[in-house]
Amino acid sequence: MDSDREKLRRIFDQDPALYDQARPRYPEQLFDDLFALGGLEAGDAVLEVGCGTGQATSSLARRGCRVVCVEIGDGLASVARLNLAQFPNVEVVTCAFENWEPGTIAFSMVFAASSWHWLDPSVRYLKAASTLKSGGTLAIVSSAHAFPEGFDPFFTDIQQCYNAIGKGVDRWPPPRPDEVADEAADIERSGLFGEVRVRRYLWSVEYTAIEYIDLLNTYSDHRSMEPAKRDQLYAEIRRQIEARPGGRVRKHYLNILNVARLLRRPDR
Protein backbone atom coordinates (compact mmCIF):
# COMPACT_ATOMS: atom_id res chain seq x y z
CA MET A 1 0.00 0.00 0.00
CA ASP A 2 1.12 3.55 -0.72
CA SER A 3 2.94 4.70 2.45
CA ASP A 4 1.43 8.21 2.43
CA ARG A 5 -2.11 6.84 2.13
CA GLU A 6 -1.45 4.36 4.91
CA LYS A 7 -0.13 7.12 7.18
CA LEU A 8 -2.94 9.56 6.44
CA ARG A 9 -5.78 7.08 6.80
CA ARG A 10 -4.64 6.30 10.34
CA ILE A 11 -4.50 9.95 11.35
CA PHE A 12 -8.25 10.03 12.02
CA ASP A 13 -7.66 7.80 15.04
CA GLN A 14 -5.63 10.47 16.84
CA ASP A 15 -8.73 12.11 18.32
CA PRO A 16 -11.79 9.91 17.82
CA ALA A 17 -13.94 11.90 20.26
CA LEU A 18 -13.38 15.10 18.28
CA TYR A 19 -14.08 13.25 15.03
CA ASP A 20 -17.39 12.03 16.44
CA GLN A 21 -18.33 15.48 17.72
CA ALA A 22 -17.26 17.63 14.76
CA ARG A 23 -18.00 15.57 11.67
CA PRO A 24 -21.54 16.08 10.33
CA ARG A 25 -23.87 13.15 9.75
CA TYR A 26 -25.17 12.19 6.33
CA PRO A 27 -28.57 13.27 4.95
CA GLU A 28 -31.32 10.77 5.72
CA GLN A 29 -32.52 11.04 2.12
CA LEU A 30 -29.27 9.38 1.11
CA PHE A 31 -30.22 6.25 3.08
CA ASP A 32 -33.75 6.26 1.71
CA ASP A 33 -32.24 6.23 -1.78
CA LEU A 34 -29.63 3.65 -0.78
CA PHE A 35 -32.33 1.19 0.25
CA ALA A 36 -34.38 1.84 -2.87
CA LEU A 37 -31.47 1.62 -5.32
CA GLY A 38 -29.77 -1.28 -3.56
CA GLY A 39 -32.93 -3.26 -2.95
CA LEU A 40 -32.13 -3.51 0.75
CA GLU A 41 -34.68 -4.79 3.22
CA ALA A 42 -34.81 -5.14 6.99
CA GLY A 43 -32.75 -8.15 8.03
CA ASP A 44 -30.28 -7.93 5.13
CA ALA A 45 -26.59 -8.21 5.97
CA VAL A 46 -24.45 -5.18 5.17
CA LEU A 47 -20.67 -4.96 5.37
CA GLU A 48 -19.60 -1.40 6.16
CA VAL A 49 -16.01 -0.53 5.35
CA GLY A 50 -14.46 2.18 7.51
CA CYS A 51 -17.35 3.05 9.81
CA GLY A 52 -15.43 5.69 11.77
CA THR A 53 -17.48 6.36 14.89
CA GLY A 54 -20.67 5.02 13.35
CA GLN A 55 -22.19 8.17 11.84
CA ALA A 56 -23.64 6.27 8.89
CA THR A 57 -24.01 2.93 10.65
CA SER A 58 -26.84 4.05 12.89
CA SER A 59 -28.96 4.96 9.85
CA LEU A 60 -28.46 1.45 8.48
CA ALA A 61 -29.19 -0.19 11.83
CA ARG A 62 -32.34 1.84 12.48
CA ARG A 63 -33.71 0.53 9.20
CA GLY A 64 -33.24 -3.05 10.39
CA CYS A 65 -30.03 -4.13 8.65
CA ARG A 66 -27.56 -6.51 10.22
CA VAL A 67 -24.26 -4.62 9.94
CA VAL A 68 -20.68 -5.78 10.27
CA CYS A 69 -18.38 -2.75 10.45
CA VAL A 70 -14.69 -3.07 9.68
CA GLU A 71 -12.72 -0.11 11.07
CA ILE A 72 -8.93 0.22 11.09
CA GLY A 73 -8.69 2.67 14.00
CA ASP A 74 -8.78 1.29 17.54
CA GLY A 75 -10.08 4.55 19.01
CA LEU A 76 -12.67 5.12 16.30
CA ALA A 77 -13.89 1.54 16.65
CA SER A 78 -14.20 1.92 20.43
CA VAL A 79 -16.33 5.07 20.07
CA ALA A 80 -18.42 3.35 17.40
CA ARG A 81 -19.16 0.45 19.76
CA LEU A 82 -20.39 2.90 22.39
CA ASN A 83 -22.50 4.84 19.89
CA LEU A 84 -24.01 1.68 18.45
CA ALA A 85 -24.50 -0.26 21.69
CA GLN A 86 -28.28 0.10 21.37
CA PHE A 87 -28.23 -1.96 18.17
CA PRO A 88 -27.70 -5.69 18.83
CA ASN A 89 -27.61 -6.27 15.08
CA VAL A 90 -24.32 -4.32 14.68
CA GLU A 91 -20.81 -5.70 15.13
CA VAL A 92 -17.69 -3.52 14.95
CA VAL A 93 -14.44 -5.27 14.03
CA THR A 94 -11.09 -3.53 14.42
CA CYS A 95 -9.08 -4.45 11.35
CA ALA A 96 -7.83 -3.11 8.04
CA PHE A 97 -10.35 -4.09 5.38
CA GLU A 98 -7.54 -5.39 3.18
CA ASN A 99 -6.60 -7.92 5.89
CA TRP A 100 -10.07 -8.79 7.16
CA GLU A 101 -11.37 -12.33 6.69
CA PRO A 102 -15.15 -12.39 6.12
CA GLY A 103 -15.79 -16.02 7.06
CA THR A 104 -18.97 -17.59 5.69
CA ILE A 105 -21.28 -14.55 5.65
CA ALA A 106 -22.52 -13.54 2.21
CA PHE A 107 -23.52 -9.89 2.36
CA SER A 108 -26.30 -8.17 0.45
CA MET A 109 -24.31 -4.95 0.26
CA VAL A 110 -20.81 -3.61 0.80
CA PHE A 111 -21.14 0.00 1.94
CA ALA A 112 -18.38 2.61 2.27
CA ALA A 113 -19.08 6.20 3.35
CA SER A 114 -16.15 8.60 2.83
CA SER A 115 -13.70 5.71 3.18
CA TRP A 116 -13.36 4.00 -0.21
CA HIS A 117 -10.55 6.28 -1.43
CA TRP A 118 -8.42 5.27 1.58
CA LEU A 119 -8.43 1.58 0.58
CA ASP A 120 -5.75 -0.13 -1.50
CA PRO A 121 -6.94 0.17 -5.12
CA SER A 122 -5.48 -3.21 -6.00
CA VAL A 123 -7.56 -4.94 -3.32
CA ARG A 124 -10.78 -3.05 -2.64
CA TYR A 125 -12.99 -4.18 -5.54
CA LEU A 126 -11.78 -7.78 -5.41
CA LYS A 127 -12.34 -7.98 -1.67
CA ALA A 128 -15.76 -6.34 -1.86
CA ALA A 129 -16.93 -8.63 -4.66
CA SER A 130 -15.73 -11.73 -2.83
CA THR A 131 -17.90 -10.94 0.21
CA LEU A 132 -21.16 -10.38 -1.68
CA LYS A 133 -23.88 -12.86 -2.45
CA SER A 134 -25.13 -13.24 -6.01
CA GLY A 135 -27.03 -10.11 -7.00
CA GLY A 136 -25.44 -8.08 -4.21
CA THR A 137 -24.51 -4.43 -4.47
CA LEU A 138 -21.61 -2.11 -3.78
CA ALA A 139 -22.49 1.36 -2.45
CA ILE A 140 -19.85 4.06 -2.25
CA VAL A 141 -20.54 7.47 -0.75
CA SER A 142 -17.91 10.02 -1.73
CA SER A 143 -17.80 13.34 0.06
CA ALA A 144 -16.43 16.71 -1.00
CA HIS A 145 -16.22 20.30 0.09
CA ALA A 146 -18.81 22.00 -2.10
CA PHE A 147 -18.79 25.46 -3.66
CA PRO A 148 -22.12 26.10 -5.37
CA GLU A 149 -23.14 29.38 -6.91
CA GLY A 150 -23.21 32.00 -4.13
CA PHE A 151 -21.01 30.04 -1.69
CA ASP A 152 -19.75 31.87 1.39
CA PRO A 153 -17.05 34.40 0.37
CA PHE A 154 -15.04 33.46 3.47
CA PHE A 155 -13.60 30.55 1.53
CA THR A 156 -12.26 32.85 -1.18
CA ASP A 157 -10.88 35.32 1.37
CA ILE A 158 -9.05 32.63 3.37
CA GLN A 159 -7.22 31.31 0.29
CA GLN A 160 -4.65 34.06 0.74
CA CYS A 161 -3.63 32.51 4.06
CA TYR A 162 -3.47 29.00 2.59
CA ASN A 163 -1.27 30.36 -0.19
CA ALA A 164 0.99 32.10 2.34
CA ILE A 165 1.76 28.82 4.11
CA GLY A 166 2.21 26.89 0.86
CA LYS A 167 -1.08 25.00 1.10
CA GLY A 168 -3.04 26.73 -1.65
CA VAL A 169 -5.04 24.90 -4.30
CA ASP A 170 -4.26 24.82 -8.02
CA ARG A 171 -7.72 25.96 -9.07
CA TRP A 172 -9.96 28.50 -7.40
CA PRO A 173 -12.84 28.41 -7.21
CA PRO A 174 -13.03 24.62 -7.33
CA PRO A 175 -15.46 22.78 -9.63
CA ARG A 176 -19.14 23.38 -9.01
CA PRO A 177 -21.01 20.49 -7.32
CA ASP A 178 -22.45 19.15 -10.58
CA GLU A 179 -18.91 19.07 -12.07
CA VAL A 180 -17.39 16.91 -9.31
CA ALA A 181 -16.70 13.45 -10.68
CA ASP A 182 -18.62 10.45 -9.37
CA GLU A 183 -17.21 6.93 -8.96
CA ALA A 184 -19.03 5.29 -11.87
CA ALA A 185 -16.09 5.06 -14.28
CA ASP A 186 -13.74 3.63 -11.64
CA ILE A 187 -16.36 1.11 -10.51
CA GLU A 188 -16.96 -0.10 -14.07
CA ARG A 189 -13.22 -0.40 -14.76
CA SER A 190 -13.05 -3.06 -12.07
CA GLY A 191 -14.95 -5.44 -14.37
CA LEU A 192 -16.69 -6.81 -11.27
CA PHE A 193 -19.50 -4.28 -10.89
CA GLY A 194 -21.80 -2.46 -13.28
CA GLU A 195 -25.19 -0.79 -13.74
CA VAL A 196 -24.02 2.12 -11.60
CA ARG A 197 -26.67 4.57 -10.42
CA VAL A 198 -25.69 7.92 -8.95
CA ARG A 199 -27.42 10.41 -6.68
CA ARG A 200 -26.08 13.75 -5.37
CA TYR A 201 -26.84 15.58 -2.13
CA LEU A 202 -25.89 19.22 -1.54
CA TRP A 203 -26.41 20.69 1.91
CA SER A 204 -24.82 23.15 4.32
CA VAL A 205 -23.94 23.74 7.97
CA GLU A 206 -23.13 26.98 9.80
CA TYR A 207 -20.14 27.06 12.16
CA THR A 208 -18.66 29.41 14.73
CA ALA A 209 -14.89 29.92 14.51
CA ILE A 210 -14.26 27.33 17.23
CA GLU A 211 -16.61 24.81 15.65
CA TYR A 212 -15.05 25.27 12.23
CA ILE A 213 -11.50 24.83 13.54
CA ASP A 214 -12.63 21.69 15.38
CA LEU A 215 -13.93 20.40 12.06
CA LEU A 216 -10.64 21.19 10.29
CA ASN A 217 -8.84 19.23 13.00
CA THR A 218 -10.64 16.10 11.79
CA TYR A 219 -9.22 16.40 8.25
CA SER A 220 -6.02 14.53 7.48
CA ASP A 221 -4.47 17.34 5.44
CA HIS A 222 -4.87 19.83 8.31
CA ARG A 223 -3.80 17.44 11.06
CA SER A 224 -0.64 16.61 9.09
CA MET A 225 0.39 20.27 8.61
CA GLU A 226 3.50 21.62 10.30
CA PRO A 227 2.28 22.97 13.66
CA ALA A 228 3.53 26.54 13.05
CA LYS A 229 1.75 26.75 9.70
CA ARG A 230 -1.43 25.26 11.14
CA ASP A 231 -1.38 27.74 14.04
CA GLN A 232 -0.94 30.63 11.61
CA LEU A 233 -3.83 29.39 9.49
CA TYR A 234 -6.16 28.82 12.43
CA ALA A 235 -5.41 32.23 13.92
CA GLU A 236 -6.42 33.90 10.65
CA ILE A 237 -9.52 31.72 10.30
CA ARG A 238 -10.56 32.65 13.83
CA ARG A 239 -9.92 36.36 13.18
CA GLN A 240 -11.91 36.42 9.96
CA ILE A 241 -14.92 34.46 11.23
CA GLU A 242 -15.18 36.30 14.55
CA ALA A 243 -15.04 39.65 12.71
CA ARG A 244 -18.14 38.79 10.68
CA PRO A 245 -21.66 39.86 11.69
CA GLY A 246 -22.98 36.89 13.64
CA GLY A 247 -19.52 35.31 13.83
CA ARG A 248 -20.39 32.30 11.68
CA VAL A 249 -19.37 30.71 8.38
CA ARG A 250 -21.60 28.65 6.10
CA LYS A 251 -19.97 25.54 4.65
CA HIS A 252 -21.50 23.40 1.89
CA TYR A 253 -21.07 19.65 1.61
CA LEU A 254 -21.53 17.35 -1.35
CA ASN A 255 -22.22 13.63 -0.95
CA ILE A 256 -22.35 11.43 -4.03
CA LEU A 257 -24.02 8.03 -3.68
CA ASN A 258 -22.85 5.41 -6.19
CA VAL A 259 -24.73 2.08 -6.20
CA ALA A 260 -23.53 -0.74 -8.45
CA ARG A 261 -24.63 -4.34 -9.02
CA LEU A 262 -22.23 -7.27 -8.69
CA LEU A 263 -21.57 -8.72 -12.15
CA ARG A 264 -19.33 -11.59 -11.14
CA ARG A 265 -17.36 -12.81 -8.18
CA PRO A 266 -13.56 -12.77 -8.67
CA ASP A 267 -13.27 -16.53 -8.12
CA ARG A 268 -15.73 -17.36 -10.94
Image (cartoon, rainbow, N blue to C red):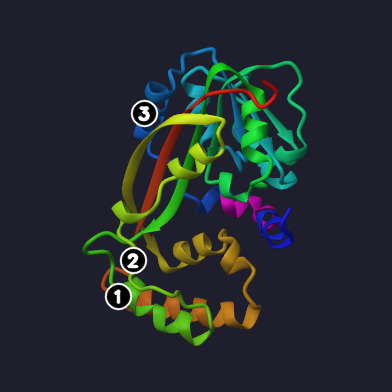
Q: Check the image and report above or below for 114 versus 7.
A: above
- Please state if 263 lies on the left or on the right of 158 as rendered: right
Mark earlier in primary sequence (1, 3): 3
Amino acid of disc 2? Arg
Q: What is the quadrant of residue 8 in the picture?
A: bottom right
Quadrant assignment for the C terminus: top right
The residue under label 3 is 33
Residue 238, given in percent of the width and then of the height, sits at 44, 76
Mark 1 touches mark 2? (CB < 8 Å): yes
Q: Residues within 10 Å of mark 2 (few under 14, many from 20)?
A: many
* Residue 82 seen anywhere in this rendered image of the structure: no
Q: Secondary structure at mark 1?
A: loop
Q: What is the quadrant of residue 179 in the picture?
A: bottom left
Q: Residues within 10 Å of mark 1 (few under 14, many from 20)?
A: few
Amino acid of disc 1? Arg
Report the magenta residues as a range: 11-19
The residue under label 1 is 244
Q: Secondary structure at mark 2?
A: strand
Residue 178, given in percent of the width and then of the height, sits at 29, 52
Report how far apart the C-alphas of labels 1 and 3 lie in the structure.
38 Å
The residue under label 2 is 248
The answer to which of 205 and 104 lies nearer the viewer is 104
| Image point (70%, 23%), residue name | 267
| Image point (38%, 61%), residue name | 207
Q: Secondary structure at mark 3?
A: helix
